Amino acid sequence: MEEKQSNSSVNEILDSVKENMKAIFDFMNSDLASIRTGRAVPELVKNIKIDYYGTSTPLNQLSSISTPDATLLVIQPWDRTSIKDIESGLLKSEFGFNPSNDGNIIRVPIPPLSLERRKEMVKLLKKRIEEFKIRIRNSRRDGVSFVKILEKDKEISADESRYAQGEIQKLTDQYISDIDQFSSSKEIEITEV
């Protein structure tokens, strides 16, 4: 009876670690879609934080974002009084945008990336990739910590603990490898002229 309980505890920890790592990877995919490849896409700006009445709010919650062509983003705020805040947030972003507004909409031209700007984008990508790898490793650390607590409390055997820690390491290695593959393809995408 106790054997089944300990296995379910280990399985719960493994499932939790796997879910957490998958969530980190999925978030990374959507977050890093904003790193420019030289084309105008709404993902470039949708997560830029705008100071809206004292609250940091993602741009896509304040406006609609469209791309009439490959070199232009058009942002239509739902509240016209926020147009200056949105413009200010775009100017402060790490992407170096130069927005202009006509009182109703904001136009954000997306110039072709220079070689220097491409190098900056790759540097930014590598920095962000490392942050996601750290999150994966923190998830591994938390999972291993829970397994060690179960072993210390005699809820699982030393063999079960070693097995669980090995499985957590395999998950970590797989997600780090997936992140590296994503990073390589994104880097190629950025540096392609």
Image (cartoon, grey):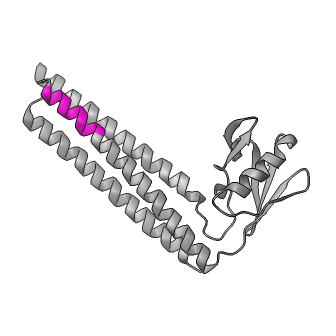
Q: In the rendered view, would you say 145 is above or below 98?
A: above
- Residue 107 in the magenta stretch? The answer is no
Q: Is residue 112 left or right of residue 167?
A: right
Above-or-below relation of 34 to 51: below
> Residue lying farthest top?
1
> Residue 163, how many percent across, how many down?
14, 41
Which quadrant is the C terminus positioned in? bottom right
| Front position in the image: 136 or 174 | 136
In this image, 42 relative to 31: left or right?
Answer: right
Q: Is residue 157 left or right of residue 180?
A: left
Residue 151 in the magenta stretch? The answer is yes
Percent x, y of residue 129: 44, 58
Is 158 placed above or below 155 here?
Answer: below
Region rendered in magenta: 142-152
Q: Position of residue 170 (x, y in %)?
A: 24, 51
The residue depicted at 72 percent of the width and 63 percent of the height is: 97
Going 65% across and 71% down the picture, which residue do you hit? 38
* Prevailing secondary structure of the magenta residues: helix
Closest to the observer, 165 or 57: 57
Image height of 35 relative to 61, above or below? below
The one of 44 and 52 positioned closer to us in this rendering: 52
User: What residue sits 68% from the left and 40% below the top?
Assistant: 57
